[in-house]
Image (tube, rainbow, N blue to C red):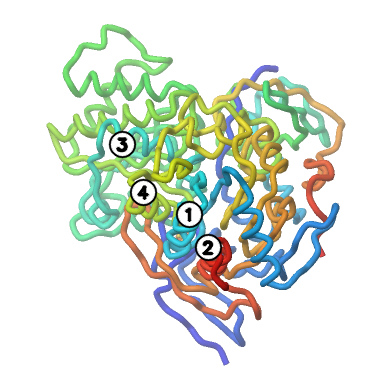
């Protein structure tokens, strides 16, 4: 299904990033996608399913959650963070500001797992001492 | 023995709340009062995932080294580069930012700050339109109408509504009963639920709605029944509320700057507020995210004439957003090294841009282990400003506040400012 994707701040994203970006709590706070409950139903999401989000810029698997800020049919929200960054756009239209809101996205249920932070960057982060 | 330190400034969001009480015991923070969930997580969680010592990349590993060695290596990377980028600064002191600008100038670098990916478009818009503004204190004491447009303060700036917004107890306006609250957003946010008037708009239609409001204020007939799904009556209702207040303030967030239209959206908002001043008093203030991103813009402006995206490669400052901005320069592969201070761009830049950043050697100054420090060629731990180091920050309305040092940093860990000055001395060939 087609959606308009917006990324933004959420309270738990702000709080959990202070507890460390490699924590499970941070991943649970930001590797998610808030959808309107009616859209969740229309997507046929079952308990335990994840969603794959595809945009012109990339694709990522995150956990779908019923939005507490509904109704917003057709809008998908992901908090700022490394998972959101997988699908945001580098085009700045001459302003310096990349494309972080209002992105066309395709969303489908999947059984694929949500990657851990290190896996997202596939071997590009050094092992810290 | 525990010690309570009153009136501390919270080093998290652009509200810079300056009434925080911090309890310190044996050199550790054990409690806070008055801070919101975000502020408390910062004061109590600053020791999570600390970067313990300087590291240099060796193969696929980061090896711990002495501070001197890290600084020497950092200076070597930056002086060897043809066009290094110097970037970050939302969460450090004004003193560190000026030190970084001194260094950037001598390096002939591209200097940019995190506003490039938050309110950069707002600054571009202000340059085109101008801005009718005020401090938050004036809003608190006088405003009888508060508008949040594309901003969800209950999530992003949790105490904003109580300290400066609809619930604030000011001199002439005493709390919620004395003020009206309007929220314009694409989702029915928690903030929207508290509004007297909530306008839910379609993503990417801010410009149209703002322009329709302007038309109404200027008594130009709309000649349509709806604008992008919002009925003309609703637009009229909001416009009447804005025109009829005695003192209104429009706070706008990244809903305007990041959505299609970007700086044009903000221009429309600035122009609306300007037009409203023909009829009443109205001001506009951007909801700045990080506690000192406003300070970064101010320091950049007084040093170079420009608030962000400054190119020193010609020996004098140049500014042309889209060309001299961090994301664009990385996308085009122009920078061949980067110095990053107090920021985690790898987590927050779009994937393609952060891949570019991971291809070049980077020097990163940060208190914490983040994807950006883990991808660094040289990572240097620094003290947490507002907790382990003092310094100045500018609140979202440009009011300077003193951040305090509450506890000592871990042994051997310097401030961003000290590390930057030492790198600079190495770069200039002096003994550091
Ligand atoms: S509102 Fe912002 S500045 Fe105030 S306590 Fe919360 S995070 Fe800190």
Q: Residue at x 19, y 29 (%)?
A: B275
The answer to whether residue A12 is seen in the rendering is no
| Left or right: B1 in relation to A110 | left
In three-dimensional space, the C-alpha distance between marks 4 and 1, rounded to whole angstroms, equals 13 Å
| Left or right: B431 in relation to A42 | left
The numbered mark, 1 or 3, whose residue comes first in the sequence reads: 1
The answer to whether residue B241 is seen in the rendering is yes
The numbered mark, 3 or 4, whose residue comes first in the sequence reads: 3
Q: Can you say whether B277 is above or below A41 in the image?
A: below
In three-dimensional space, the C-alpha distance between marks 2 and 4, rounded to whole angstroms, equals 20 Å
- Of labels 1 and 3, the one closer to you: 1
Residue receiving disc 1: B106
- Of labels 3 and 4, the one closer to you: 4
For disc 2, the chain is: B
CB under 8 Å between discs 3 and 2 = no
Q: Are marks 3 and 2 on the same chain?
A: yes
In the rendering, at what x and y percent does residue B120 appear?
Answer: 43, 39
| Left or right: B393 in relation to A50 | left
For disc 4, the chain is: B
User: Circle 1 sits in a helix, a strand or a loop, which is it?
Assistant: helix
In the rendering, at what x and y percent does residue B156 appear?
Answer: 50, 48
Residue receiving disc 3: B126
CB under 8 Å between discs 4 and 1 = no
User: Circle 3 sits in a helix, a strand or a loop, which is it?
Assistant: helix
In the rendering, at what x and y percent does residue A89 appear?
Answer: 61, 28
CB under 8 Å between discs 1 and 2 = yes
Pick the residue in front: B295 or B266.
Answer: B295
Q: Can you say whether B68 is above or below B311 in the image?
A: below
- The residue carrying pointer 2 sits among few (fewer than 14), some (14 to 19) or many (20 or more) residues within 10 Å by Cα, namely some
Residue receiving disc 2: B428
Residue receiving disc 4: B304
């Amino acid at each position: 299904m087609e959606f308009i994707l917006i990324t933004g701040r959420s309270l738990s994203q702000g709080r959990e990033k202070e507890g460390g970006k490699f924590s499970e709590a941070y991943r649970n706070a930001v590797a998610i996608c808030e959808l309107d409950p009616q859209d969740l139903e229309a997507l046929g999401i079952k308990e335990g399913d994840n969603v794959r989000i595809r945009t012109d810029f990339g694709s990522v698997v995150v956990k779908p959650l019923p939005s507490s800020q509904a109704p917003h049919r057709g809008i998908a929200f992901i908090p700022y963070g490394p998972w959101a960054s997988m699908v945001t756009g580098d085009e700045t239209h001459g302003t310096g500001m990349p494309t972080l809101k209002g992105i066309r996205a395709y969303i489908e249920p999947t059984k694929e797992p949500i990657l851990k932070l290190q896996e997202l960057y596939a071997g590009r982060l050094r092992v810290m001492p | 023995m525990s010690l309570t330190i009153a009136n501390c400034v919270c080093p998290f969001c652009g509200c810079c709340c300056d009434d925080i009480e911090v309890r310190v015991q044996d050199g550790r923070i054990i409690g806070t009062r008055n801070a919101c969930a975000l502020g408390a997580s910062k004061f109590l969680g600053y020791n999570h995932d600390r970067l313990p010592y300087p590291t240099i990349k060796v193969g696929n590993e980061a090896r711990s080294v002495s501070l001197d060695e890290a600084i020497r290596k950092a200076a070597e990377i930056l002086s060897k580069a043809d066009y290094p980028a110097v970037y970050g600064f939302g969460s450090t002191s004004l003193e560190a930012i000026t030190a970084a600008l001194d260094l950037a100038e001598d390096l002939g670098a591209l200097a940019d700050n995190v506003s490039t990916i938050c309110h950069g478009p707002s600054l571009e818009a202000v340059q085109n339109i101008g801005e009718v503004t005020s401090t938050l204190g004036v809003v608190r004491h006088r405003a009888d109408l508060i508008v949040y447009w594309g901003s969800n303060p209950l999530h992003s700036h949790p105490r904003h509504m109580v300290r400066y917004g609809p619930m604030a107890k000011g001199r002439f306006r005493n709390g919620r009963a004395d003020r009206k609250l309007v929220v314009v957003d694409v989702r029915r946010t928690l903030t929207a639920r508290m509004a007297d008037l909530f306008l839910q708009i379609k993503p990417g239609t801010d410009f149209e709605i703002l322009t329709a409001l302007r038309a109404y204020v200027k008594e130009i007939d709309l000649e349509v029944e709806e604008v992008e799904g919002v009925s003309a009556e609703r637009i009229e209702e909001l416009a009447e509320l804005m025109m009829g207040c005695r003192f209104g303030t429009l706070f706008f967030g990244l809903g305007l700057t990041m959505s299609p239209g970007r700086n044009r959206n903000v221009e429309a908002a600035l122009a609306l507020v300007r037009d409203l001043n023909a009829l009443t008093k109205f001001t506009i203030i951007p909801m700045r995210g990080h506690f000192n991103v406003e300070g970064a813009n101010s320091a950049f402006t007084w040093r170079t004439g420009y608030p962000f995206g400054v190119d020193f490669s010609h020996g004098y400052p140049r500014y042309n957003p889209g060309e001299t901005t961090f994301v664009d320069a990385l996308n085009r592969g122009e920078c061949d090294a980067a110095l990053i201070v107090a920021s985690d761009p790898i987590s927050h830049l779009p994937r393609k841009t952060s891949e570019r950043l991971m291809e070049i050697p980077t020097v990163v100054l940060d208190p914490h282990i983040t994807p950006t420090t883990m991808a660094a060629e040289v990572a240097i731990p620094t003290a947490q400003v507002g907790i382990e180091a003092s310094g100045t920050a500018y609140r979202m309305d440009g009011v300077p506040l003193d951040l305090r040092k509450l506890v000592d940093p871990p042994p051997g860990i310097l401030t961003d400012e000290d590390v930057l000055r030492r790198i600079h001395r190495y770069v200039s060939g002096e003994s550091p």
